[in-house]
Image (tube, rainbow, N blue to C red):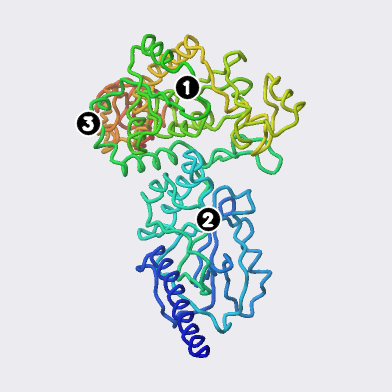
Amino acid sequence: MHCGILAVSNILVCVLSIYIYSKFTLEDMKLLGEEWISNNSNESMLTMHWCFGQQSKICHFQSLCYYPFEDQFVYMIDSSAINEVKSSFHSLSFSSVNELDVFSFVPVFLHQNSTRLNIRWIHGNVILFKRFKPDNLMHVLHDDVLPLYHTIKLLGHEDLKLLFMDDHSQEPYDSLYKIFADVKYKPSGKKQEFLCFKSAFIGVSSVSKWYQYGYHGNVQGPVSNEELTAFYLQTAANSIASKLKCAKNSDNQHMSVKDYLVLISRTETRKILNEEELISQLKLITKMNILVISDNDLSEIVCTVVMSRGIIGMHGASLILGLFLKPGSILIELFPYAINPDNYTPYHTLADIPGMSIIYRSWRNMKKENSLAHPEYSPEGGGIKHLSEEIQAGIMDQIEVPLHSCCSDPSFLFHINQDTIVDVEKVSEITLDALTDSQQKDKTDRKSVSFMEPSVVKQLHCSCIDNKLSLSWERPWNIDFVNDDVIHYKIGIQSRMLKTYKVYVVNDYSYTLEDEIDCFDTYDIWINAETNGIQGVLKYIEC
């Protein structure tokens, strides 16, 4: 009787084990997507890779494997020297925040003829990537989405898939990643099988990176990136806005013209305590509508910012929305008491990137009595109750947070998360000043549309009859794209006999010279177009 029960129990345990294993397997396959998976056992088990780039290295792998059970990548090798292969992975990172070792690619090595390997193949071109801080919009855009956008463009594949290899779950801003690629999440480690990639990429472009956060004892600040111009940011931002249907949404009532400013309202920490008063004063001084955004839908927020004249808000992640501002817009950043704007400049740096043309202003609360501190908050949120009374007193008496590295300085966290009564008159004043500069810059920028170098004139001809030198030409082709009706043509003429050189400026497409012209002479002639003081390419003819 007992034997029978034991036998039945063993069968039940066996069936249950198979069910659980199958359940986990099915869940992981569903997570990755069945269209990603195959069981082709004829694939080569020799991993190969090719890398390019130095500051932002990107490597292409064939037959790279991942072992979820140990959360490690596996490089299948033959008799090659492992150290030589390892050295090629120096500075290869799953993230643009490549100064952190946690994002470094460090595989383990197995011989390609290793047995007892249960393998599932992932087909297609897959980018293996780790999100930095997927719950923070600043980090999502600056550290993840912009680098991924330019990596995808660089690789040139239209069918790229994106597999998150971090331990974060699905986050609210994941929709931004999904704009550009088919996104899946790291499979769990509940089964002992290898996932091997037919074609995988590790590493991202850093061409759009402008800021670092002060790791390894450094202080935060701009990065040295000589390649970076507004082109790399605006092309990505415009693509995001287009994918979010902002062009379509621009027909909405408040988005048809840029007649409003956006105030970013914080509802948990770093609040503006007199927000309504600030809104009223801004409306009065600027004669503009003030739209308040806080927990709105991300698409709605981006599209609202795109069509605005600018952003006003406390220092925080949402100011990264300045990325979507049009040239000539304003960005007003407010800082709590004891926080020096010169030490925290991700958005000031953004505004100053060549070609962004954003008018930046900052305001700093200099009155302690206009701050509401929260020593009772958690340590991560700026609370200091866990510290000794002496240290607490020292922090609360500070008039400026000392320079510090990332990321848990209690003094910084305490002061940055204060609520603030802002000086509404001063903030309105600097906002109006920025708008005045913006209007002036807008005129300059509209004029600068024609600040392009005219191309060479076309169909240049010359003839000399009766000691009259006649010239004719057609206007450069790109003049049609210049918003300037005044086009001048500079003509330089050199006589080989007289050794003289004369310059003439005309507005027509032909010109005849009679002064000191001898048809038995030979003339070297140069002509170029000029608009807005910009001289075009010279065209030469011998006559």
Which type of secondary structure does the marked residue at label 3 adopt?
loop
Name the N-terminal-most of marks 3 and 1. 3
Q: Is residue 150 left or right of residue 81?
A: left
Among all residues in the image, which is located at the extreme front?
A: 1
> Which residue shows up at 52% across the image and 70% down it?
64
Total marks shown come to 3
First in residue order: circle 2 vs circle 3: 2
Q: Position of residue 502 (x, y in %)?
A: 40, 23
| Residue identified by numbered label 1 | 332
Residue at x-position 45% and y-position 79%: 43
Residue in the foreground of this view, choosing between 506 and 414: 414
Mark 2 vs 3: CB contact within 8 A: no
Residue kind at label 2, given as amino acid type:
Asp
What secondary structure is found at the residue carrying circle 1? strand
Mark number, residue 350: none
Point out which mark residue 166 bears.
2
Q: Position of residue 8 (x, y in %)?
A: 46, 85
Q: Nearer the viewer, residue 277 or 203?
A: 277
Does residue 114 sit above or below 356 in this rendering? below
Q: Position of residue 463 (x, y in %)?
A: 25, 33
